[in-house]
Image: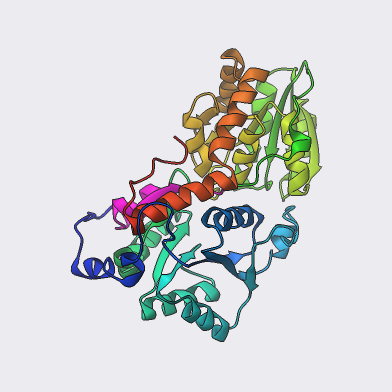
Amino acid sequence: MDMPVSNTPDPADAMASRRPHDAQATPGRAPVYSRIVFWEPCVSPHKSAFINAVAERFGPSVEVRCVAHEGVPDTRQALGWGDGSAAAPPTDVAPSPERIAAIIESGGEHCLHVFSGIRWFSTLTTALDLVRAQGRAFAIMSEPRDNAGVKGAVRFIQSWLTESWLRRRVQFVLAIGRHGPPWFKSVGYRRDRVFPFAYFLPPPSPQADTEPGAQASLHIAYVGRLTEKKGVRYLLPAVRALGPGARITIIGDGELREPLQREAAQLGVDAVFCGVLPIEQVQLRMRTFDVLVLPSTTRDDGWGAVVSEALMAGTAVVASHCAGASILLDTPRNGRVVPPANAESIADAVRDLQQTGQLTARARRYRSNWACDRLTARAGASYFEQIVRHRAGGALRPKEFYL
């Protein structure tokens, strides 16, 4: 039910392009904006490093800060996120409406507001209304909405009917994951303003930068919630199909933990259930795994930061095409993309990685170098700057970050 998308500039868009915040921008290293504000639903370790890197990239002539609707939610801390305080950029948490208005007013015409979402969080929706009223420059950074089934059709119609102003005036859209760009284009955002994007993370810690020890077994890993939509019920049959040399480490918790433990015993699968671990420990352990599996059956994983962490550690990845980060696996040396809800396909993909030499130390080094060149916070900040200078400063459109 995709509706036709027009790429023809409308008069309102032409007027927007002549605003002072665009006119003052010039290609090259000259500042395009004097301030950049990231509006976030919560403080997130998956965003903090990137925002800090943007500040470093633009330098002291551009003030970069974050405004968050809340701190790290308890539910996320329970998943190993921590409180987010260690590496958080300058951040206003849970600001009052008056504080939101003051932030936008003080930014003036030479401030770019980047919204991580346009619904549900009053801090973001209040700020977006003020940005609209004052004609300020803004961008959207977002995962796609799930367009599956009847609910997906309703979401599509809602986006098409309610986002007309956003489509006309947005400077650019940072569309996260494999399904991000198709979603925004399908609901009418101009193709030349939509850019594929990711969650860009800190590089692996120096402590983890060692080769894994020689192992006779094949070490599979899963990191995430143990729920139906994560596809975890297909993990154990896949590991069993790989034979007695395969084992799996499962990091995370959820309602399926006890059923999975019983199933592992029944199937005779060598499985270790670690529960939830802090992000830092997960990153350190990633180097010991041969393959990470992310078998999502829905588009709940708009990206899947653990895929980035695995590739930066050199670990190969098998993921369903539902996961946004599966786009990184279109490079065959990184891993394989499989259909959801299919244990046999997971096992076949792991075998193929073995048989094609993608689990060797040399292959790990290639993946790690490839990922660190493209997926770190600094790489993301460079890509972000190129997008800003393209849209507001006349520079060439950058190539996709994963190429």
- Nearer to the camera, 156 or 382: 382
User: Which residue is depicted at the point 57% across and 21% down?
Assistant: 348
Write the start and end of the magenta stretch as one range. Answer: 181-200
Q: Is residue 80 left or right of residue 234?
A: right
User: Which residue is depicted at the point 63% across and 69% down?
Assistant: 91
- Residue 328, compared with residue 177, is above or below; it is above
Quadrant, the C terminus: top left
Is residue 314 at all visible to an observer of this figure?
Answer: yes
- In the image, is residue 188 part of the stretch drawn in magenta? yes
Q: Quadrant of residue 162?
A: bottom left
Q: Is residue 170 left or right of residue 361?
A: left
Q: Is residue 80 left or right of residue 115?
A: right
Q: Is residue 256 left or right of residue 149?
A: right
Disc tally is 0
- In the image, is residue 339 part of the stretch drawn in magenta? no
- Nearer to the camera, 282 or 136: 136
Please provide percent x and percent y for residue 334: 55, 28
- Nearer to the camera, 13 or 119: 13
Please provide percent x and percent y for residue 299: 50, 48
User: Which residue is depicted at the point 26% across and 68% down?
Assistant: 18
- Residue 316, compared with residue 139, is above or below; it is above
Instruction: Identify the coloring.
Output: rainbow
